[in-house]
């Protein structure tokens, strides 16, 4: 019988969360780079200047912000999607359990314990990012600056986790957990037969 390590719900949530986070980070990169309001505004100001039309840097920045707004609205949409996925993920974890070793569990190796802590920190920081994002929009005006700062910082931490996660998975797939990448995609994969050879799950069974 074919063994499955990651069920369909786990895999769908994993990839939905992953792609939503990547999309959110993409909108942030666009906001900071190509669609930076000051950069876009300066291009507009220079073009108008060639035709003899004066435009202040402040007004150019406001126009640049307006040009960027349709793109940035997708950041809000993805944020709402991420909140929904996060809540579903928490419910699934309560019902089915977590896919990683609890870091407080006794007898764990340092590597496994570190892996568990990275997941705990990730979910805490992701919750902080979602909460501060909502508060920066709908919270008291006096909270806006502080919430925005924490929101931006938490996104950097989430990006750091993604890098660590991808690196850890690649290392695991090449070592002690060979086939883990195929398992998170299809739900099953090759296993090590203990003699250094990789065989299919059907043959292993």
Image (spheres, rainbow, N blue to C red):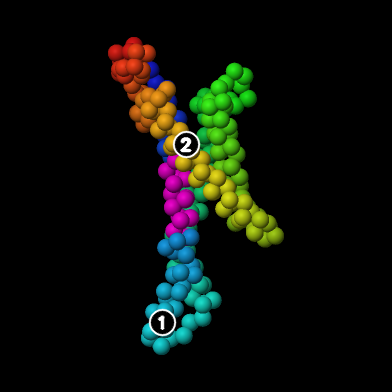
**Other residues around mark 1 within 10 Å, as few (<14) / some (14–19) / many (≥20):** few
Residue situated in front as seen by the camera: 80 or 37: 37
Tell me, yes or no, if residue 126 can be seen here: yes
Residue beneath disc 1: 48
Q: Element at badge 2?
A: helix
Q: Residue at x 45, y 33 (%)?
A: 168
Height in image: 156 above or below 53? above
**Spatial distance from mark 2 to mark 1, Cα to Cα?**
47 Å
Residue beneath disc 2: 165
Q: Position of residue 81 (x, y in %)?
A: 49, 45
User: Which one is in front in this view, the residue at disc 2 or the one at disc 1?
Assistant: 2
The magenta region covers 17-31
In the rendered image, residue 63 lying in the magenta stretch gets the answer no
Residue situated in front as seen by the camera: 24 or 110: 110
Q: Quadrant of residue 6?
A: top left
Q: Element at badge 1?
A: helix
Q: Residue furthest right?
A: 142
Q: Position of residue 47 (x, y in %)?
A: 39, 79
Height in image: 65 above or below 4? below
Q: Position of residue 163 (x, y in %)?
A: 46, 41
């Amino acid at each position: 019988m074919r063994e499955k390590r990651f069920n369909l719900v786990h895999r769908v949530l994993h990839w939905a969360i992953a792609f939503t986070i990547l999309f959110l980070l993409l909108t942030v990169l666009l906001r900071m780079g190509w669609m930076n309001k000051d950069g876009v505004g300066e291009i507009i100001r220079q073009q108008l200047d060639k035709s003899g039309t004066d435009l202040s840097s402040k007004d150019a920045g406001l126009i640049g912000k307006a040009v960027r707004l349709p793109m940035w609205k997708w950041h809000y949409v993805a944020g709402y999607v991420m909140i929904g996925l996060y809540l579903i993920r928490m419910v699934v974890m309560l019902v089915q359990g977590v896919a990683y070793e609890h870091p407080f569990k006794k007898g764990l190796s340092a590597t496994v314990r570190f892996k568990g802590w990275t997941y705990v920190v990730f979910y805490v920081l992701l919750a902080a990012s979602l909460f501060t994002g909502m508060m920066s929009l709908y919270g008291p005006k006096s909270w806006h600056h502080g919430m925005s700062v924490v929101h931006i910082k938490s996104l950097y931490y989430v990006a750091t986790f993604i890098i660590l996660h991808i690196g850890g998975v690649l290392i695991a797939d090449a070592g002690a957990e060979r086939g883990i990448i195929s398992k998170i995609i299809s739900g099953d994969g090759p296993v090590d037969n203990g003699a250094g050879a990789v065989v299919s799950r059907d043959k292993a069974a």
